[in-house]
């Protein structure tokens, strides 16, 4: 009973139910394919369970006839060996071709060469049928027959139509040895993800196909959609960065490229991929929002900041992209990395109201007072601001919890710019919001250095001074105001 249980468990765990056509009948076998290698015209296929063992080996090119009943052709110096073991009995047939392509065959019963009689002929016919329908060797023969009848297009159509994944994989392997049209490449590309299980194998296929076939935006879209099935972050990064500069992109293909990037789970690999593809997709406006979403999906603050900083430093970057980067930086949880990402977007040219607004809204999400003040000072120093925008900067200082850091920004605003009535009003409201009398004094002394203070602004200044809790500070500021007037 124990032995039987082990046998059942082995076939259930390892087994693969396959229907094999033999002698016009369907028979059910349970077993496992545990060896298959295809390289340099050398193919080995082995199928086994505890009671039966089937093995086929091919060197060179061997074509089995339609429906698998005989050998149709062999290239010179080719070889095909097929063996079957049932319990303790083994039979094998070997087909060989000489230098002229003449075919000979030898039958073995165990290790002994036997003559081929009617019984042996029947077994050879049945074993060829199994080889033709159920092994990559047979699939190679089918592929060669399809190529002979209909060419590459017919084989590409057959690869797309077959429900046998092993057969489809073999057809694709054969196709890759021939010239493929762009249309045929579009047909077989989606199939590759279903039949190529390894991430490195699928990556190699996609890159090879892109180099082999004249490109089109439709093929590019298919390549990126197929790449999304690669589970390895590093392999997906390699294929996307490898394809981006070498395939034609339209809006749809660029969007598909970014969507594929979002499948990368590793923060560092996703950041590196975004940096690698960004120069090729930013000109496609439909893809920009997807790119910002992909950047925002990076879980690591440092890697998200790295991606934003890289893109911000690209040449000829337009302000619309900078605005998107400023908004995206809001997703960075680290205050220092958030500030670094924002600062990278400054100093790129003329002022844009949407960009400044996005920058300030993002900056206000920085929790650290020192990092927030640094971000605001960088904006003041590097971007030409209108009076209304200077007012917005003053208002943003209310998000700074530190009195000294708040005053530091206000002093820089006053020192760097000649303020008008609107921004002075926002400046004084920010000063009144500061809880430290000494820092209020520092901010107002900077404002008093302005060349001109409109009359209405002076009235608001007096009201602000009166709200300061320290009497000595109030006296000093009123003295300064009198001296100025």
Image (spheres, rainbow, N blue to C red):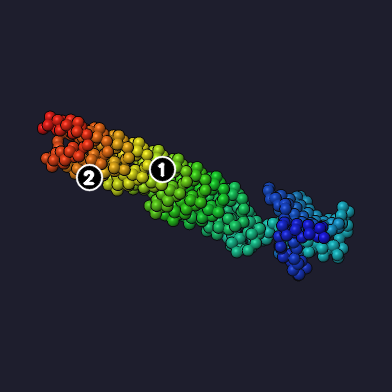
In which quadrant will I find the C terminus?
Answer: top left
In which quadrant will I find the N terminus?
Answer: bottom right
Q: Residue 185: give its label.
A: none
Q: Nearer the viewer, residue 136 or 326?
A: 326
CA separation, marks 1 and 2?
Answer: 27 Å
Residue 426 occupies quadrant: top left
Residue at 77% x, 60% y is 8
Residue 381 visible at all:
no
Q: Nearer the viewer, residue 416 or 252?
A: 416
Residue 441 occupies quadrant: top left
The picture places residue 223, in percent across and down from the top left corner, at 52, 53
Residue at 54% x, 47% y is 233
Residue at 35% x, 38% y is 369
Look at the picture and state if 19 lies above or below 266: below
Residue at 11% x, 40% y is 455
Sequence order check: which comes first, mark 1 or mark 2?
Answer: 1
Q: Is residue 165 left or right of residue 297?
A: right
The residue beneath circle 2 is 388
The picture places residue 159, in percent across and down from the top left corner, at 61, 60
In the rendered structure, are the residues bearing label 1 and label 2 in contact, judged by CB atoms less than 8 Å apart? Answer: no
The picture places residue 23, in percent across and down from the top left corner, at 78, 68
> How crowded is the residue under tag 2: few (<14 C-alpha within 10 Å), some, or many (20+)?
some
The picture places residue 357, in percent across and down from the top left corner, at 30, 47
The residue beneath circle 1 is 308
* Mark toward the viewer: 1 or 2: 2
Q: What secondary structure is marked by label 1?
A: helix
Look at the picture and state if 231 lies above or below 128: above
Q: What secondary structure is marked by label 2?
A: helix
Q: Is residue 377 left or right of residue 465?
A: right
């Amino acid at each position: 009973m124990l032995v039987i249980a082990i046998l059942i468990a082995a076939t259930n765990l390892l087994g693969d139910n396959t229907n094999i056509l033999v002698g016009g009948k369907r028979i059910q076998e349970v077993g496992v394919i545990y060896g298959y290698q295809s390289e340099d015209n050398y193919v080995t296929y082995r199928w086994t369970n505890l009671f039966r063992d089937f093995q086929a080996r091919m060197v060179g090119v061997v074509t089995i006839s339609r429906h698998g009943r005989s050998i149709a052709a062999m290239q010179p110096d080719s070889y095909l060996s097929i063996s079957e073991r049932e319990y303790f009995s083994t039979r094998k047939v070997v087909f060989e071709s000489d230098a002229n392509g003449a075919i000979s065959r030898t039958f073995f019963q165990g290790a002994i060469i036997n003559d081929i009689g009617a019984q042996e002929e029947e077994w050879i016919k049945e074993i060829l049928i199994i080889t033709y329908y159920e092994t990559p060797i047979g699939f190679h023969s089918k592929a060669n027959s399809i190529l002979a009848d209909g060419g590459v297009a017919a084989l590409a159509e057959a690869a797309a139509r077959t429900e046998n994944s092993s057969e489809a994989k073999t057809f694709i392997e054969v196709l890759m040895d021939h010239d493929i049209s762009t249309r045929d490449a579009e047909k077989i590309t989606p199939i590759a993800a279903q039949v190529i299980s390894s991430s490195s194998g699928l990556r190699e296929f996609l890159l090879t196909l892109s180099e082999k076939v004249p490109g089109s935006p439709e093929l590019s879209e298919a390549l990126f959609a197929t790449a999304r099935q690669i589970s390895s972050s590093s392999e997906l990064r390699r294929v996307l960065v490898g394809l981006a500069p070498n395939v034609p992109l339209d809006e749809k293909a660029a969007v598909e490229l970014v969507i594929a990037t979002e499948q990368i789970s590793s923060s560092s690999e996703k950041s590196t991929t975004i940096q690698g593809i960004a120069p090729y997709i930013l000109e496609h406006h439909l893809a920009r929002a997807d790119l910002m979403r992909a950047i925002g999906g990076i879980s690591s603050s440092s890697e998200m900041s790295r991606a934003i900083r890289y893109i911000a430093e690209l040449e000829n970057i337009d302000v619309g992209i900078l605005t998107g980067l400023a908004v995206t930086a809001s997703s960075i949880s680290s205050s220092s990395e958030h500030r670094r990402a924002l600062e990278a977007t400054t100093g790129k040219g003329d002022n844009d109201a949407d960009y400044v607004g996005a920058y300030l809204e993002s900056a206000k999400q920085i929790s650290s007072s020192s990092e927030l003040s640094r971000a605001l000072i960088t904006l003041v120093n590097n971007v030409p601001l209108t009076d209304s925008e200077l007012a917005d900067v003053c208002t943003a200082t209310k998000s700074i919890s530190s009195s000294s850091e708040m005053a530091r920004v206000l002093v820089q605003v006053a020192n760097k710019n000649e303020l008008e009535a609107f921004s002075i009003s926002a400046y004084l409201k920010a000063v009144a919001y500061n809880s430290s009398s000494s820092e209020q004094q520092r901010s107002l002394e900077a404002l008093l250095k302005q060349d001109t203070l409109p009359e209405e602004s002076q009235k608001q200044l007096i009201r602000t001074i009166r709200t300061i809790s320290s009497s000595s500070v109030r006296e000093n500021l009123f003295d300064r105001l009198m001296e100025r007037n």
